[in-house]
């Protein structure tokens, strides 16, 4: 298996792009959304109105990755986007990287970033990229059999899998089947701040995930007069079927809202992620904490 990976990597390093497959309506909607935003984001500069928020998000990811990344580790980056976290993994000593994202234009940007486009330094680790739905069971068969990772990361994207129990379970199955065996999940609704470095990669795999706090979203919805809330920079709009503003614990999946974030997200459908449900699913796949 190692030889097969090396041959594939050496043959395609500059191409860097794997398969593309269709997905559910929700996945295809997300793909269309982020592909549409592709050209718009190329023109953004340091004058961005949400620069502080972007910096906060990058800080959160940097802390999590620094806490759990080890030199020599292999990384599976689900919803990798344009590869913006590769530098964080590089700083942590990444040796092998696989990026997966539903939006093919974002994946092409990630390939360019890896190869040193736009004056950047090429990444020093070996890498491969897939345009695919990270919450589709078919992803497991697309990656080389037996290829395991020290760290699987899914940053600010878990909510796209909670359109249904099947998709959420597929995400956790994709994570669990690709982690080195034995470690608990590191996904948590809090920050982990003790980012002390070590020299060797961890002997067992770790899953890092971040997503919006469903409790905060529901609390703000209930505090609003209608079905939307926000400010000049963001807006969340819930559908008419959420008029009761009740979300029974017995029905944790499929609770959607339309989310807009200035310069970043344009009226895209997202889903509430009850943390208890996420933990239970992780536990059912041997990754609970």
Image (cartoon, rainbow, N blue to C red):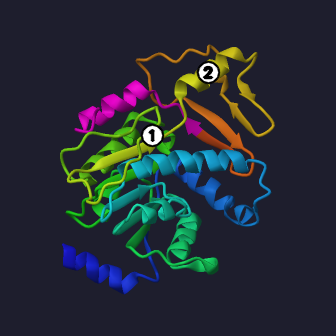
Q: Is residue 175 above or below residue 132?
A: above
Q: Earlier in the sequence, mark 1 or mark 2?
A: 1
Q: Is residue 135 above or below residue 218?
A: below
Q: Which residue is drawn at the image coordinates 62% and 21% (left, top)? A: 242
Residue 81, by quadrant, is bottom right
Left or right of 139 on screen, residue 33: right
Residue 228 visible in image: yes
Residue with the mark numbered 1: 193
**Placement of the C terminus among the 4 image quadrants:** top left
**Placement of the N terminus among the 4 image quadrants:** bottom left
User: Closer to the camera: disc 1 or disc 2?
Assistant: 1
Q: Is residue 200 above or below residue 286?
A: below
Dot 2 alpha-carbon crowd within 10 angstroms: few under 14, some 14 to 19, many 20 or more = some
Q: Name the foreground residue: 190 vs 278.
A: 190
Looking at this view, name the residue that lies furthest to the bottom.
11
Q: Which residue is drawn at the image coordinates 38% and 48% (left, top)? A: 196
Q: Answer whether residue 57 is magenta in the image.
A: no
Q: Name the foreground residue: 207 vs 251.
A: 207
Name the spot of residue 253 as percent of width and height, x first: 45, 29
Residue with the mark numbered 2: 242
Q: Which residue is drawn at the image coordinates 71% and 61% (left, top)? A: 41
Left or right of 217 on screen, residue 275: left
Marks 1 and 2 sit apart, C-alpha to C-alpha, by 36 Å
Mark 1 element type: loop
Q: Which residues are magenta?
A: 270-289
Residue 156 visible in image: no
- The number of callouts visible is 2
Name the spot of residue 70 as percent of width and height, x first: 33, 57
């Amino acid at each position: 298996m190692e030889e097969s990976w090396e041959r594939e990597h050496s043959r395609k390093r500059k191409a860097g792009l794997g398969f593309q497959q269709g997905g559910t309506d929700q996945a295809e909607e997300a793909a269309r959304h982020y592909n549409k935003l592709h050209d718009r984001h190329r023109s953004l500069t340091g004058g961005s109105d949400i620069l502080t928020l972007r910096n906060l998000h990058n800080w959160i990811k940097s802390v999590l990755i620094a806490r759990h990344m080890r030199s020599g580790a292999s990384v599976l980056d689900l919803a990798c986007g344009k590869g913006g976290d590769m530098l964080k993994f590089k700083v942590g000593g990444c040796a092998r990287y696989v990026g997966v994202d539903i939006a093919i234009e974002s994946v092409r940007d990630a390939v360019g970033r890896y190869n040193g486009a736009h004056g950047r330094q090429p990444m020093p680790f070996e890498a491969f990229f897939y345009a695919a739905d990270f919450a589709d069971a078919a992803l497991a068969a697309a990656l080389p059999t037996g290829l395991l990772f020290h760290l699987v990361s899914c940053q600010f994207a878990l909510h796209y899998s909670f359109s249904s129990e099947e998709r959420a379970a597929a995400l956790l199955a994709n994570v669990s089947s690709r982690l080195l065996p034995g470690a608990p999940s590191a996904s948590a609704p809090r920050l982990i701040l003790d980012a002390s470095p070590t020299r060797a990669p961890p002997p067992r795999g770790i899953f890092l995930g971040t997503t919006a706090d469903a409790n905060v979203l529901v609390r703000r919805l209930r505090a609003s007069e209608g079905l939307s809330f926000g400010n000049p920079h963001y807006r969340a709009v819930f559908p008419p079927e959420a008029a009761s503003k009740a979300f029974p614990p017995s029905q944790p999946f499929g609770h959607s809202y339309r989310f807009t974030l200035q310069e970043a997200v344009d009226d895209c459908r997202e889903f509430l992620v009850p943390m208890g449900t996420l933990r239970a699913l992780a536990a059912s796949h041997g990754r609970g904490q």
